[in-house]
Amino acid sequence: MDIPIIGAECRPGWVTMLRVPVSAIGLSHHLVPLEDLAQLSLLAEPVRTRLDDAGLRGSVLLNTCNRFEIYFESDAFHAGLESVLGAVRDALPAGQRALADQFEVYAGQAAVQHLLEVASGLDSMVIGEDEVIGQVREALAGAGDRASASLHRLFHAALTTGKAVSAETDLGAAGRSIAAVGLGLLEQRHFPLAGRRVLLVGTGSYARVVTAALLRLGCTDIAVHSPSGRARRFASTHPVTAVATDGLDGALAAADAVITCSGAESANGPVISAEQLSRARAQTIALLPVLDLSLSGDVAPDAAGLLGVDLIDLEEIGAHAPAEQAAAVLAARDLVSRGVDAYLHLEQGKAASPAVTAMRAHVSQFIEREIESAARRYDAETAAAVARSLRRVSNALLHTPSLRAAELARTGELADYSQALHTLFGIDIEAGA
């Protein structure tokens, strides 16, 4: 299988980029229909389980309504890539395994840039959406011990850049989240939500986002239904009214608008069928706007054909997402570029640490011997002065070679430096030290 690797063709010296310790594979709304992403989303745990047996140094799965991506660190890039793709392929049903062949692959620096763009909202369905930085944070937290030290550093760099984009640009002005765009579209087509009765289906983390957005719009009459029976618990911490598990028909009949975002709760199929909607709305002639924010679809697609229902799904929200100002996008991309440079400067410089440590240890053994000899030959004050002088000279002599090691690490030429240390001084650099 010949998989194109993003980053592999960026410049003639692209191989050095593979020395950045992390890589990634991913699918997003740019590449496949949302129903394919929904299928992958339901397989998140089986994929994680298979990744545990893939021989990786670490992995983080970023699973959102816009994307399904795996960031990983492995001893060998190509072997790691095949292991990760194999984990995805094995988790997919037999008839859908070809989906694994559609994943984009991000090598080294390209993986770094991609994650920073994702965390900044530049790669989202709604450019500048404000939920994605929280999703990146949750992905790292959810990885737990699966995330290696390198992956922790990468995700923290992405979060830092995402915060800078949010604070220093207008990219996410007015909180242009998917929920906000969807609610705005609903109000544009129908009526202001302030003073209306809204039925919210779902009690997960995204339901909290939607509840907050509704309250900002002045909607205070919110009923919540949970297919898994969590409505009362959600209502105990939010200004909403719980709907009984068997009360969905009545809540649909009484609602002015319905918003669904149950996500994983709808794994067994749509929460609301067309037949149920038709039955519940049989006694009213009012048009019911239904905003389906669930990736897997909480509302049956054929409900869009009902005369009394206006179904707005994620595809339609994406089509109506506002175009961002070019200046804000350029400013955000500049911050991402600076974030990538800062990350690479620090990360690739770390490769020099074993060489620098070995070189300093080699010199220090001679310095300490001379200090011990001086302590035997001279009085304490003179011996202390000799020790200070030797250490000062040692640090001065090692300063430039240490800086040079860091520079060579960033350009991929550290191997020649390490070989020179071995040839000239017999210093061996421990691999992975």
Image: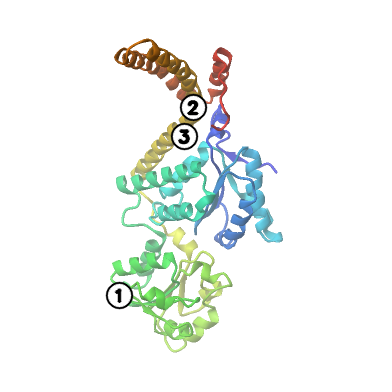
Residue 324 visible: yes
Q: Which residue is mark 1?
A: 220
Front residue of 373 and 215: 373
Residue shown at 60% from the left, 45% from the top: 56
Mark 3 / mark 2, whichever is N-terminal: 3
Residue shown at 43% from the left, 71% from the top: 203
Q: Which residue is mark 2?
A: 352
Q: Residues within 10 Å of mark 2 (few under 14, many from 20)?
A: many
Q: Which mark is residue 321?
A: none
Q: Position of residue 93 (x, y in %)?
A: 68, 61
Mark 2 / mark 1, whichever is N-terminal: 1
Identify which amino acid the numbered label 3 is placed on.
Answer: Glu
Q: Which residue is mark 3?
A: 347
Residue 119 higher or lower than 395, as above or below: below
Identify which amino acid the numbered label 2 is placed on.
Answer: Ala
Residue 185 higher or lower than 393, as above or below: below
Location of the C terminus by quadrant is top right
Q: Position of residue 291 (x, y in %)?
A: 44, 70
Q: Quadrant of residue 80?
A: top right
Q: Residues within 10 Å of mark 1 (few under 14, many from 20)?
A: some
Q: Secondary structure at mark 1?
A: loop
Q: Position of residue 53 (x, y in %)?
A: 64, 51
Identify which amino acid the numbered label 1 is placed on.
Answer: Thr
Q: Quadrant of residue 289?
A: bottom left
Front residue of 293 and 400: 400
